[in-house]
Amino acid sequence: MPVTALLSAKSCGVTASALALTLASKRPSLLAECDPAGGTVRAGFLNGEVGAGYGLYHLAAAERTGPDALANAFANHLWPMDDAGHRKLLPGLTDPAQAAALSRTWPSLSEVLHVLSADAEYDVFVDAGRLALESGHLHPTLTPAPLIHRADLVLLVVRSTEHSLTLARHVIDPLRTELQERGSGADALGLLLIEDGSYRAHQVAEALKVPVLAALPWDPDTAGYLAHGGRPPRGYGRSPLLRHARTATEQIEAASSRRRIQQEFPARQANPQLAGVLQRLAEQRGGGSRG
Ligand SMILES: Nc1ncnc2c1ncn2[C@@H]1O[C@H](COP(=O)(O)OP(=O)(O)OP(=O)(O)O)[C@@H](O)[C@H]1O
Ligand SMILES: [Mg+2]
């Protein structure tokens, strides 16, 4: 299963979308809250029930002891978000000042997340917060750069409004170059579209020259509950956001396996017949793409 990093040009629904995907996935799933500006799930969706003794910050100290200590600490700091324990949260930082301590932890954490996704078949979603650049590259403290570099897919979350597209347009090129030069390749980049404006998915893809890999509906009640907590709205379990998030996890998984196949057989990419077969196989797995 893929490790998918979600980020934005400016706050537009990364955390709510990442939570929706994690809660809706058909598979065991994990949300790693790695926004250096601080996590919001413990105070929001989890209504403050997770204390500061849990979470990402504690992995920094463990990593200094060694890789085994980090792996153990990781397992001990996961918080179950359902009764069966299939949906887990690695709670984020409680103070943005803690972010600097994480810079040497990100590569080892990335390794653990990839083992969890490859060997234990978890759907792993990383809340990577807002994109911050320094001299044209991902900022070393204000972004979890190593996690973004190594992610199977990097989804820029955008809303289908002129404002959101304008903000996104400025970060696409640096992000693409960063992934090409320091990451797993520019083809890791895709869009997760939040449908709150007039633009359709194909128009957004065309405008930003990046494929829309999945889309989520505008659903203020459910998103408000995921982002800020409180009481679940009526019909929460069957809400548009969670239903479409389930489809989105399949589309994300399909895009990731498509990419993996293309990386394994690069020489054959030029073969249009094989490309057609790959496309059909991916569609059968993911149920096609919305929009
Ligand atoms: N699909 C959606 N439908 C309606 N509202 C949404 C949706 N997704 C997010 N929102 C709303 O947008 C606001 C911001 O959401 P969220 O906190 O997830 O953004 P973010 O990108 O993580 O922001 P930050 O960068 O500040 O962490 C919240 O009020 C949330 O309810
Ligand atoms: Mg957030």
Image (spheres, rainbow, N blue to C red):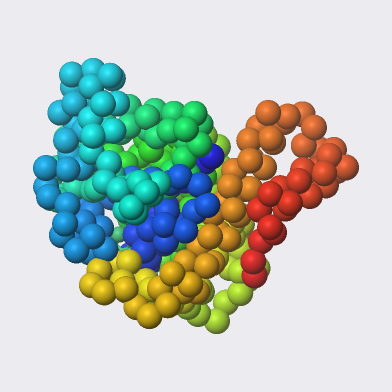
Residue 61, percent across and down?
A: 15, 28
Residue 220, percent across and down?
A: 38, 78
Residue 260's place in the image compared with 70, above or below, is below
Location of residue 19 (image quadrant): bottom left
Left or right of 122 in this view: 211: right
User: At x 29% / y 26%, what residue is drawn?
Assistant: 71
Location of residue 56 (image quadrant): top left
Left or right of 221 in this view: 200: right
Camera sees residue 166: no
User: At x 67% / y 42%, what residue is drawn?
Assistant: 258
Q: Residue furthest right?
A: 273
The number of numbered discs placed on residues in the rendered structure image is 0
Which image quarter holds the C terminus?
Answer: bottom right
Q: Residue furthest front?
A: 84
Residue 165, percent across and down?
A: 48, 69
User: At x 50% / y 36%, what residue is drawn?
Assistant: 121
Camera sees residue 57: yes
Residue 197, percent across and down?
A: 50, 80
Residue 74's place in the image compared with 22, above or below, is above
Location of residue 15 (image quadrant): bottom left
**Which quadrant of the frame does ligand 1 lie within?**
bottom left
User: At x 45% / y 45%, what residue is drawn?
Assistant: 28
Left or right of 20 in this view: 271: right
